[in-house]
Amino acid sequence: MPKTILDIVKECDNFIHPTEDPIKYTQSLQTYYVFRLPDCPTPLGYIPASIIPQIIWSPEWWCINHTSKTVTLTAPGPAPARTQRLAQTLHDTRAARSLALLSGWRNETFPVYGPRGDVLLEIERAASALFGVVTYGVQLLCYVRCRDGGLALWIARRAAAKQTYAGMLDCTAAGGLAARMRPVEGVVREAAEEASLAAETVRARVRATGCVSYFHVRGADAGGETGLLQPEVEYTYEMELGEGEEPRPGDGEVAEFRLWGIEEVVAALRRGEFKPNSAVVVVDFLVRHGVVTPENERDYVEIVARLHRRLEFPVCTVPMG
């Protein structure tokens, strides 16, 4: 049975909402440990209880409280010192080969922000889901205007060899936002690497269109352990391409690009062929361009609300590094 647009959004934003079922939400939280820093008043992430025994915790730097279910990095600041202690913990765990997720080590760090927007520490990208911290990314959709006035989207198919979501449909270009990288620089980099779009062209013509946010529980297609949490903010961009302009696979992460009509895109969404967080970016595009409207979609208000979830952890509006 084809999925509804709301189904598609819920498959990405699939961590239970506290307002949907407060009792179930509270019960769900009992299966996680809260990641904290001693000088930060707010939680920074949720770690599944099943993961706690798999990580090599040094008692010199970590306090694991099994009663309050908290994991506190006790190493004092500044941020580089905390980052180094966390990195050592992750290197030790990776050496122990106790977690499949760490086999995809990237040697790239993501920032973890505090409530004032300051960087509290950085975490290896491959390990971010282990701690359930907020991560950031960029997503670009390139489109063309058809002669009949409609739109068509340049859709990527992920390479079969990708560690995550292999062979699924994707936006034109997308990627995680590394520490100290502004969103616009991130989208310029991804467009060049994945879609062979010239950096100067993207800088001149790309248009920032906002962001989507969601709280995702990772499944088997994400790679590594299942049930890990991924609260995320994706900065969205779009760019119109003219006649003779088209993306081409660049770094091996994309198998092919194809120009899809809007009806084809919606049908593929309903069949579940898109990577989950790319699917919500496409839905956001359809809302923005008046394809999904209050008149043709009975769940319109909930769809728009779920595309912009308020996360339980500190969120930096524009990561500055």
Image (cartoon, rainbow, N blue to C red):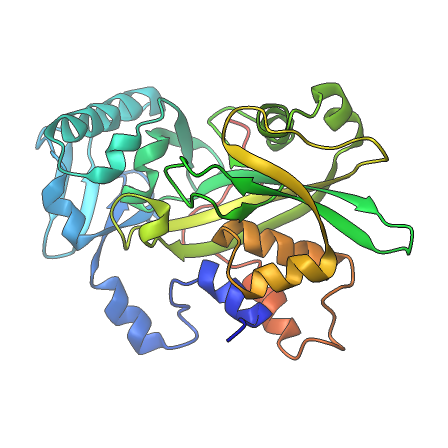
Q: Is residue 189 above or below residue 69?
A: above
Percent coordinates x, y for residue 78 in the rendering: 33, 23
Q: Residue at x 73, y 58 (%)?
A: 262
Percent coordinates x, y for residue 147 in the rendering: 91, 51
Q: Is residue 293 above or below residue 207?
A: below
State whether residue 25 appears in this view.
yes
* In the displayed structure image, the side of residue 28 where residue 54 appears, left or right: left
Q: Residue at x 33, y 20 (%)?
A: 80
Q: Of 52 and 274, which appears nearest the observer?
A: 274
Q: Is residue 275 above or below residue 164?
A: below
Percent coordinates x, y for residue 170 in the rendering: 56, 45
State whether residue 318 appears in this view.
no
Percent coordinates x, y for residue 288 in the rendering: 74, 57
Q: Residue at x 27, y 43 (%)?
A: 224
* In the displayed structure image, the side of residue 272 where residue 131 appears, left or right: left
* In the displayed structure image, the side of residue 314 where residue 105 appears, left or right: left
Residue 292: quarter of image: bottom right
Q: Is residue 302 above or below residue 252?
A: below
Q: Of 193 and 87, which appears nearest the observer?
A: 193
Q: Of 140 and 159, which appears nearest the observer?
A: 159
Q: Of 306 and 7, which appears nearest the observer?
A: 7
- How many numbered discs? 0
